[in-house]
Structures are given as structure tokens and as C-alpha cells.
Amino acid sequence: MRKDFGAKPWIYPEPVLIVATYDENGKPNAMNAAWGGIADDTQVSVCLSPEHKTVKNILASKAFTLSIGDAKNLVACDYVGIASGNNTPNKMEKTGWHFCKAANVNAPLIEELPFTLECKLISYDEKTCRCWGEIINLSVDEKILTADGKIDMQKFEPLIYDPCNHFYYKFGEIAGKAFSDGLKLK
Amino acid sequence: MRKDFGAKPWIYPEPVLIVATYDENGKPNAMNAAWGGIADDTQVSVCLSPEHKTVKNILASKAFTLSIGDAKNLVACDYVGIASGNNTPNKMEKTGWHFCKAANVNAPLIEELPFTLECKLISYDEKTCRCWGEIINLSVDEKILTADGKIDMQKFEPLIYDPCNHFYYKFGEIAGKAFSDGLKLK
């Protein structure tokens, strides 16, 4: 038997995306966005309602970074999704995060978050809340890389959001290898 | 130190989305799509290139279901991302999956996959490969629910894709509760 939940915007896994921007004075801001991800081989899209300080900043700076929330930064990642840069002037100070300019776009890099897509604004549509960005570069802290330069999931510890129960999860065990070509199909 | 990877379309976690459709004769098809997710509180978006059988089916039927790949169905979920419905007439038979009509849209429900968004087509853009769907209903198999009707993550076992290393992961331990209001911030 199946149960109908109605039109719920739930998906598993849901990412924890931290969008960081500069305001018109070069002051960094960051927020947590759940509804977004890779849009195609060179683009991201994120749902950002127009009242966000982040949206004002993106429209002015034409750029943003998209970092992945990780277990080490769980509290700060959660906090930037609750507090607003519109009415919390010291929002970023409270996170304890350090910012530097991203190498390739006019947006801040959060030094504590090891995995960051540097993006240029393609378009923002106030009606659909859809922000499209072109991926210019993926910047990864070497501390989460294996000796041969790949992402080490155990060092990275990206967060996963559970939209039904409101928990953050870590990645668990490997379930299998992709592109197995269905060899074990019955 | 950080390492530049260039314009990589990588995100963590990446979902394993199984898009199921009917063709013009009512025959079910399904494929695995990695680049998609929740677009806003009532919509999903998925990147589907126009040559897919799935796209032809969606344009004709105006509907699709979006199910979440789970550990129990890993091999079949992986397989439907490799084989094409255009040149593999028995693609669905090989999965071992059973199909019934979704209750609310003109698209098949895969009985083995317990978590399914029933969606009506809003629009498809061949140029951007973007398929937008309106979430009509979330249909969940009771076997992955807790006694009080919530999603039980241990019963569900949704897959997570690792786009750098090409592994599927399971969810791991709970890292923390959302909306903690930054109580533990320094």
C-alpha cells in the first residue's frame, strides 16, 4: 500500500548549498539554499526568493559561490539558513567563517568550506525565483583530497538534508559502483 | 591550499532520480537522471537531453514520475542510466520492475521504488535540456514509513551518487538537527 502526501517538495538526498556573495561595499554574505543543484554540464540553478540579501547582491555583483555544507560546519551552515543578512548585520561574524575573494569570480570563498563552485550569474527570474549560474571553476581544499587528487568522502563529510524529518545526515557506506552495466540483473 | 578542477558539474550529495514515462502505446520506460531536483515549493526540474526516449514520451504524455533510487534497486537504477529505450526494446523487462499507472498523472509508477513524485509537464526546452514538472502528489510505500507516518530513513535507504568517484553511497549517521538556531555558535 502507498500513502499520498500531496504536493510535497521533498527529495532524497537534498543538498546543503551555501551561497556566498558580496554586497555593494564588498561585504560578504552567505545563506543556505536547499532547492538547487547541477542544471547541466556547465550550469547550476538555485531557487532564491527575491527578498533575500543574497539576491540583491547577486544582481549587483553578477556572481556567487556555491559551497557544500559539511559536518564540521553544520551549526554555521544551519544558522545562515535561519538568520537573514537583511536584518542581522553581524550574521557573518557569528558564523566564525573567514572569507577571501574567489580566484575566478567576484564573490567570496568561505575558507572553512572545502568544496566550492565559483559561478557567474547567467540570469535571475524574480517570478520563478530561479537563479542560473555558469560554473567557472570548482575549487577544492587539498585537505579533502586523496593522494591521487580525487575527492575523499571520509575527509569531506558533506551534509545531506532530510526534508521530512529535518535532520542533517552524513554519507554512509558505499552501496555499489556506478556503470556496472547491469551485470547482476536477473 | 586549494586545487582548481575547472568547470566541473559536481555536487554533493547528487540524487539518483528515476524518471518513468509511458510511450504513445502505453508502454513504460524509465531512465536515471542525475541533474535535477526540487525547483520550488511545487515544482521539480530535470536536465534531459532531447534524444532520450523519455523526452519523446514526456512531450506526448505531458507527465512523468520521479522516483528515488534506493539501495535495494541499485543495479536496476544504474542499468536504466546506461541502456537506452531507443535501442533496447526490452530495457524495462531486464530491470525486473513492475509498473502500474500512477493515481494522479498519466505516467507509470515503479512498484519497487517506494518514494515517487507524480508530476505533470510544465515545459520542456530542447535548447537547455530543461524539463519542468508540477508536483501533483508524493506517493510513498508504507513499508518505508514509521509508525507515525514519517519517512523512515533506515527502511528507505535512498542512494547518493558520487560524481567524482562514481560510487553510490547510502545515507550514514545523523549529523545534527536542522533549525538549531545557532545555539552552539561561538
Image (cartoon, coloured by chain):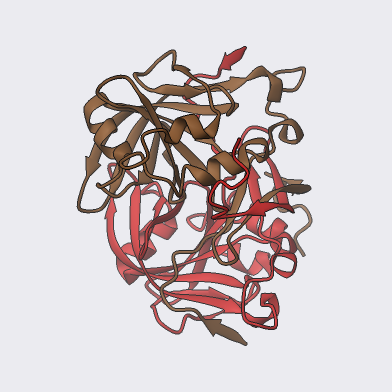
Chain colours: A red, B brown
Please identify the quadrant where the C terminus of chain A is shown.
top right
What residue sits 58% from the left and 29% below the top? B113
The residue nearer to you, when weighing A63 against B133, is B133
- Compared to B25, does B92 lie above or below? below
Residue B137 seen: no
Give the image quarter of residue A164. top right
Snapshot quadrant of residue A5: top right
Is residue A136 toward the left or the right of residue A29 in the image? Answer: left
> Can I make out residue B105 in this image?
yes
Q: Quadrant of the N terminus of chain A?
A: top right
Task: Name which residue lies at 36% across and 60% down.
Answer: A56
Residue A90 position in % (x across, y down):
59, 65
| Image quarter of residue A11 | top right
Q: Position of residue A113 (x, y in %)?
A: 62, 70
Front residue of B2 and B105: B105
Q: Above or below — where is B160 with respect to A30? A: above
Which residue occupies the foreground of this view, A48 or B37? Answer: B37
Q: Position of residue B165 (x, y in %)?
A: 60, 65
Q: Residue furthest bottom?
A: B1
Q: Left of A58 or right of it: where is A150?
A: right
- Residue at 66% x, 65% y: name it: A95
Q: How many marks?
A: 0
Residue A55, placed above or below residue A151: above
Residue B185 image offset from top left, x and y in percent: 75, 60
